[in-house]
Structure formats: structure tokens, C-alpha cells
Amino acid sequence: MSALALSARRLTWKGMVMPERARAQDAATAVPGALMQAEEEYRSVMNGPVPADAPLAAQDRLRDIQLIADAELSHLDAEHFLAKLLDRLKGILQGDTAAVLLLDRSRSQLVAAAASGLEEEVRQGVRIPVGQGFAGRIAAERQPVIIGKVDHTNVVNPILLAKGIHSLIGVPLLAGGAVIGVLHVGSLSPRAFTSDEAHLLQIAADRAAIAVQSLLSRSDREAAAALTRSLVPAALPAIGGLEAAARYAPGDGDVGGDWYDVFTLPSGEVCAVIGDVAGAGLKAAVAMGRMRSALRAYALETTDPADVLHRLDRKMQHFEPDVLATVLYAVFDPDQAQVRISSAGHLPPVIAAPGQAAVLADIHPDLLIGMLGTADRHSTTLQLAPGTVLCLYTDGLVERRDRPLDDGLAMLCKTIIAGPPESVCGSAMGALIGNQPCSDDTAILVFRRRPA
């Protein structure tokens, strides 16, 4: 019986059309070793309908597996998939409740994420410490747990007791060998759950793990994209004597931590920032937002770009020591005749004077924000003759896996001319991005001192 239950991995895989196949492959590695043996024993069964002459128990179990592996479920989005799967599990295991709890690694707690018959767990934001109670024990031991009689000695969630749940069965959600949550089914009446049913529930958990990862990934992408849009200026400020244009293009993968900002100071100076937080997704976007706000605050305290980045670095190393970022900060004088620049490991800007070829500005590259070290930071002053263009950008514009970075920088220099910023931005994006897919975010910020 348990071999038949375990053999459902073939059906589970065949029935899947979800985009997270790579994650599915990771999840598959978490299935018990007996699965592979069972797959060989029942290969002929899994490749066709349930034989009419198979034992009734085997027929029932294979049909249960097919309900879990049903391709119809794969066409649902992650939230509806989980809801439908939980409902089916209640029917298959003759249960009254089913729930999925996800692991919050930062707090070592399980958080109720989806439920059927136990919706109050989700609505009340139930959290269970890993290692405590029923679900916490499953996550800690990474093994199925069956409880024949629920009481205060084996559960810590008061909702389970108040609900009157008598018996419970639960298994870990595994992805790439790591626990990402717990799936459990409960019965209001006495119910002797078996190891075969635990194997069946584990198969369902493997499918649920894929949906959970899809749900979390989609949620993070949407939140990161929304946060990035809110932090990148909708329009650049009007600056007398200085023309400006910008582009931001998210990559094909997760939204990263690329950002730029332009603002004025009470002194009349104009400040420009461009940066790239290491990593991608919501975490990078949140770090980017915090850095943006902190830098603006420090800019009001000192007009020295090196001092601003020094303060920003000190703040990040103290409060967010796991964040690394490159940042280039430029301060234009009120008459725009010169600009002072400090770089925290960021790529150098491109400067193009009228009638001259564009070149990489000769600035001192200091340590990244967040990198341990005590080296001083430096500011470099560049003279801006009327009509001169200054281009700031992130590595997504020039860096590709199939070519040296220097080649990308040379291409950018050939593209930048002392022309209107809007057309310069368009030319740079067209020449270096074009119609090719790009996995990394791209930001470009172009300024021109108005021609005389």
C-alpha cells in the first residue's frame, strides 16, 4: 500500500504544467527514497488507467493519487490551487479540516497561510514556534506526525482545541531539501490515520510546496515592483540651467535594487544619486528604499558627497549589516559649472564635452556601502563646460555574461554624445539593450549643462 501511494510522483509530475519546473525538481528530491523503488514497481500502472482487476484497496489509493495529481489543478493560480487541494485532501482522508502553514525563517515560526474548515487560523494570523506543538514538531523533525487524540500536551494552538479536533496527521512541505512549511489534516471524530495516508499526504505536500513557492515568488515580485515604482521619481524636477532625462527598465527576472534619485537642496545645489543594491526581489527593494530616504536626510546635513556616503555607510553597517550596495552621488553647483562626485564602488560616469568623444570620468572608486573597512571616502570635482553631458547608469546597461565589462563600457562611451538628454538616453538604451532580453534591471540618468 505505501509503495502504491509513493509511486504517485510520476502522476504528480505528468500532471504539472506550472511554470516553476525547476522548483518542482528541487521539491522532488525531498520525496522519501522508497518513491524511486515504487516508481519502478508500478511503472505500467502509472502510465495508464487503473486496472479493473487491481485490488480494491489499490484502486482506491491510485484514484486518490490521481485526484491529487489531477492536471486540472495545475491550471489554477497558486491561491486557488491550494484551496482546491485542501478541499480534496479532506475528502480523500475523510477529514474535517486542512491547513498549510509557512515557515517564517526570520522568526523561526510557522504562519497559517491557507485553510479549509479551519479558516480562523489564517484570519487570526496564527504563529507556531518551530519545535513546539504539533506543526512545530513536524517542521523541526522534518517527518510526518500522527496524533490519535489531540490535547494540550501535544498541541500549542488553542484554535485546534477550541475547534474540537480529535485526530491530526501532518507532513512537512519540502523544497530543495529544506522545510518551507507544514501541511496537516484533522478530524473532529476519532480517526486512526495510517502511515500509508501519511505517504499520500506527503505527495500532496510536494505539490503544495511548488504552489507555495510560486505564490511567495509572485507576491514578492509584485511588492518589489510596486515599491520600486513608488521610489523612482515619476518626473525629474525642473532645474534652471540643467537639462535631465532618465530611464528605468526592470529585468526579465526578479526586480532588483537599481534606483536613482534627483533632488534640490536649499542652497540651490542639485543632487543626483544612482545605485544598485546587491540581490533582487522584495528584500533588495526594501533596502533600496531605506537607503534612498537616509541619503536624502544626510544630504541636508552636509553638501560633501563623500561625507554623505560615509554617513550612509555607517548607518547601513549598523542597522542592516547584511546589505551591500554600490552608490554614486553627485552634487551640481548652483551655476552647474562643476559637479562633485563620490562613488561607493559604482561604475564611473561617462562625460561628453561638445566636440569631444565621451570618456569615463576619472573618479576615485571607494568601498561599497556595507563593506567592512575604514578607508576614507573621496570626492572628485569635474568641470562642466556649457553643453557638456554627464551620464550615470547601473551595471544592467553595460554588463553581459557573454562579453567583458570593458566592452560594454566602450560601447556606452561610443553612444554618449553632447546632445539633448532625452535623445542620449534613447540612443544608449537602443544600442546597449535593444530588443534583447536582459535579466538585470537597468537605470540611466543623463544631465546636460545648457549650451551657451
Image (tube, helix red, strand yellow):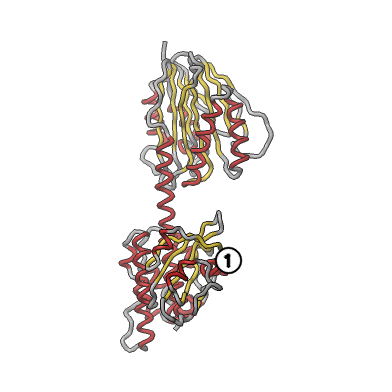
Q: How crowded is the residue under tag 1: few (<14 C-alpha within 10 Å), some, or many (20+)?
A: some
**Residue drawn 52% across and 41% down?**
287
Single out the residue that lies furthest toward the top: 452
Which x, y percent locates residue 380? 59, 22
Image height check: is 9 above or below 226? below
Q: Nearer the viewer, residue 24 or 100?
A: 100
**Residue drawn 59% across and 38% down?**
316
Horizontally, residue 156 falls left or right of residue 8, namely: right
Which x, y percent locates residue 271? 49, 24
Residue 73 in view (yes/no): yes
Which amino acid, mark 1? Answer: Gly
Horizontally, residue 236 falls left or right of residue 108, namely: left
Which x, y percent locates residue 342? 57, 27
Single out the residue that lies furthest toward the front: 162
Kindly identify which residue carries mark 1: 131
Image height check: is 35 above or below 293? below
**Residue drawn 57% across and 41% down?**
324
Label 1, secondary structure: give it: loop
Horizontally, residue 212 falls left or right of residue 317, namely: left
Residue 39 in view (yes/no): no
Q: Nearer the viewer, residue 292 or 356?
A: 292
Horizontally, residue 322 falls left or right of residue 214, namely: right
Which x, y percent locates residue 14? 37, 69
Image height check: is 257 above or below 129? above
Image height check: is 108 above or below 341? below
Q: Quadrant of residue 132?
A: bottom right
